[in-house]
Amino acid sequence: MKLKTIIAIIICKLLRAFSRLVHRGGTAMPGRIALKVCPELLSIVSKGVKTVAITGTNGKTTSSRMVEQAFLEQGKSYFANRSGANLISGITTEFVMNSSLTGKCRKEYAVIECDEAAARRVFPQLRPQVVVVTNLFRDQLDRYGEVTHTLENIHAALEPIPQAKLCLNADCSLTSSLALDLPNPVVYFGIEKGAVPSRPKPEISDATHCIRCKAEYDYDYISYGHLGGFSCPRCGYRRHKADYAVTEILSQGADSSSLIMDIRGEKHMVTVNLPAMYNIYNAIGAVAAVSEMGLGARAAIDALADFQCGFGRMERFRLGKGGTRMMLVKNPAGCNQVIEFLENVREKFILVVCLNDRSADGTDISWIWDADFEGLSKLSGYLEKVVVSGDRASDMALRIKYAGIAPEYIETERSYEKLVSWIEQQEEPVFIMPTYTAMLELREVVISHCGGSEFWE
Amino acid sequence: MELKICHMYPDVLNLYGDRGNVLCMTRRLKWRGIDASVTKLPIGDSRSLAGFDLVFIGGGQDFEQQVLLSDLHRGKDKEIKAAIEDGVTFLTICGGYQMLGSYYETYDGKRCDFIGALDLYTKGSVKRMIGNYKFQCSPSAGGSVVVGFENHSGKTWLGSGLEPLGKVLSGYGNNGEDGSEGAHYKNVFGTYSHGPLLPKNPELCDLILKTALERKYGSAELLPLDDSFELLAHDEMCAKL
C-alpha cells in the first residue's frame, strides 16, 4: 500500500463529507481529485469486488436499478452508483466511500452504471465480472460522435478484460457485433420474433447497413428503431439466438407489462413494474446480468415486479389531481419510445416538454427533429395541451407546431416554479418529458411541492 | 400549383434532424394551399431525377460514405450535375453539400472523389467545428440572417468563380478562416447549417420554395404566414450569438 493511495482515499472521503455538509451531491468531484493524486485508485479500491457493469446508449440507469433490486432482495452485501455519476470520477468516489482507509472494499458486490464513452478508462481498472451492453443508438452527436465511434470505444474498453462475461442485446446489430472478434464469453438477451407485432422499418434507423460488410440488412421483424431480427444478405452476419428471451408479451399497461421469458429453455411468467417496450429490453437484460452474476434468474424476476426506478425514469409523483409522470428523454430512439407510450394513454392528458441544450444534454438540439413527435398529432381527443419549457423552449414549441399540433394548443412556461404550481391545479394526468439537466432542476421543484428523494439517495 | 420534392438518400443522410427541412418545406407550401409531394430516393434506387422541382440532400455518418459514393458513381452523379445546370433547385447540407464538390481529402491525405457539380473541395482537419452559429446570406440569396448548428471537421474551400451562400457572423462556416459560409450556384443552396436549417429561418425557406416555384410557373407569390413561433426561436438564438 503506497502512501499516495491512502492520501487519495482520505481526500476523497473528506471532500464527500464536506459536500454533504453543504448539501451538495459530491458524487463525482471527490473521485476526480483523488484520481489526480493516485491515477490507478479505482483498480485498487475495486480489487476483489464482484462487479457487474452496465453500459450502452439507453436504459443504463433503469437496468442498473433492476439489477440492484435483485441484490437488495437477496440480502447481498453490495453497493451501486445510484446517483447517475457514471464517469470514472463518480465510480471511483462510490468505491472509495465503500472502502476502508487502506482501500479494502467492505462490500462483496458492486452494481455499476458506466457511461459508454468513459468505459474505456473505467473497465481496465474496474475489471467487472459481467458487462451488460444495453443497446447502441445515435446520441448527442456533439459529445459522443457517430454511433460507430461509441461502438469502437466500448470495444476498446472490453479488449483488456477478456475474461469478463458479456451480456449483449441480440437484437441490436451494433451491440452484438462486439462478439464478432472479442474472445470474451458471451450470452445474449432479446425479444423474439412473434412477441412483438412486426412493424415497418422506421424512417430513421441508426444501423441500416452491415457493420461488417456494409450491405443493407434484411429484417424478419423489428421491435423498435434498428432492433430486431436483422441479417446481412452478403456476409451472413445475423441476429444470434437469445439465451435470455422474451417470447411473448401478454399485456402492456400504463404502469406495467406482463410477459413470458424463456431463460435457457425454461419458461417464466414475469411482471415488469414499468410500462413501455424499452423497459422490456431493460428487464430481460437485467435478468441476464443477475443470472450471470450467480444470483439465479428467479431473484431477478421477483425484483422486476417490485422495483421502482425513480430519478426521472418513468417516475411518478403525487403532483396534480391526476398525478404526474416524469420520463427522461435524451435521444431520438428513447424519445420515440416515450411518444409511443403516450400514444397508448387512453385518457385526457397534458404533456410538458422541457428542452435544455447544456453539455450533459448535448448542445445540439437537432435530434428533436429526428424524433417522431408527429405521433402526438394522432392524439386529438386525448392530448389536451402541450406546455414547453427549458432553455430551448421556443425551439421545442416550433417542433411541436411542425409536428401538426395547432399553435393554440401550445403554451410556453419558462419558470419551473410557475409550471409546477400550474400542474398542481390540473385535473388530468400530466406527463413531463425533460432532457437530462432539465430533469435535475425540474425534479427538485416538483419534490419541493410534493415530496420525493434527493438525487443521490 | 405543386412542387415535386425529392429527398435523396434519406436512409443514410439523416444525421442531424435533416428531415425537419423537408417537413418544413411541405408544411409551408400546404399552409398556403400549394401541393407538395415528397419522393424518397434511397441508396440503390435507380429512379431518375427528371421531373423533380426541388432536391434535398442532408448530412450523414462517415460509416456509410463508401456505400453512398459507389451509388453516386453508378450514374446519379451525372444526373445531379445535369439537374443543377438545368436550374433545378437544390438544398444540400453538410455531407450532402460537400458531396457536390470535387473531392474530400482526409487529414492523413487520403483523397475521395466526389461528383464535381460545384467548384469546391473539402479537406479534413483535426479540430471539429461544432456549435451554434449565424451567418448573413448574400443579397442574391435574400440577405437574411440565418441561425443554425454546425458540426464538421472538413474545411471547405470555394473556387474563385463560386459565390458563398453568406458571410459568417459568429461561428466557423466553410472553413473557419475566410469568413465564407456555404455556396450558392444557380439554384443550388449548399450550407453546413443543420439544426435543422429551415424551421427557424422561414425567410430562407420561403426563398428556396419561391425559387423552385418560379422556375416551374414563371412567377410565384407566397402568401405571408404567421411566423411568430419561427421568429421567436430565430431571434432568441440570434441574441445569444
Image: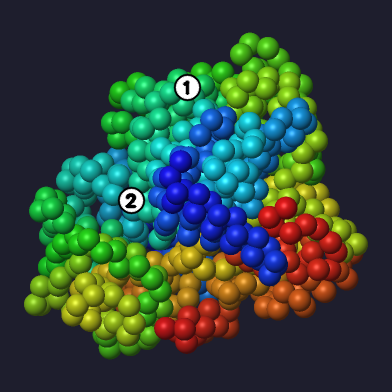
Give a yes or no on whether discs 1 and 2 share a subunit. Answer: no
* Residue pointed to by mark 2: B61
Q: Amino acid at mark 2?
A: Gln
The residue positioned 49% from the left and 54% from the top of the image is A7
Specify whether B210 is left or right of A454: left
Secondary element type, mark 2 = loop
| Residue A404 appears in the rendering | no
* Residue pointed to by mark 1: A186
Tags 1 and 2 touching, CB below 8 Å: no
The residue positioned 48% from the left and 80% from the top of the image is B237
The residue positioned 79% from the left and 53% from the top of the image is A316
In front: A435, or A112?
A112
User: Alpha carbon of mark 1 to alpha carbon of mark 2: how far?
Assistant: 29 Å
Residue B84: percent from the left, percent from the top?
Answer: 21, 65
In front: B61, or A2?
A2
| Residue A418 appears in the rendering | yes
Residue B212: percent from the left, percent from the top?
Answer: 34, 71
Badge 2 local density, few (<14 within 10 Å), some, or many (20+)? some
- Observer-side mark, 1 or 2, equals 1
Of the 4 image quadrants, the one containing the N terminus of chain B is bottom left
Residue A105 placement: quadrant: top right
Badge 1 local density, few (<14 within 10 Å), some, or many (20+)? some
Residue A232 placement: quadrant: top left
Of the 4 image quadrants, the one containing the C terminus of chain B is bottom left
In front: B34, or A188?
A188
Give the chain letter at badge 1.
A
The outermost residue toward the top is: A265
With respect to residue A182, does B84 lie above or below?
Answer: below
With respect to residue A243, does A198 lie above or below?
Answer: below
Residue B30: percent from the left, percent from the top?
Answer: 53, 69
Give the chain letter at badge 2.
B
Residue A396 placement: quadrant: bottom right
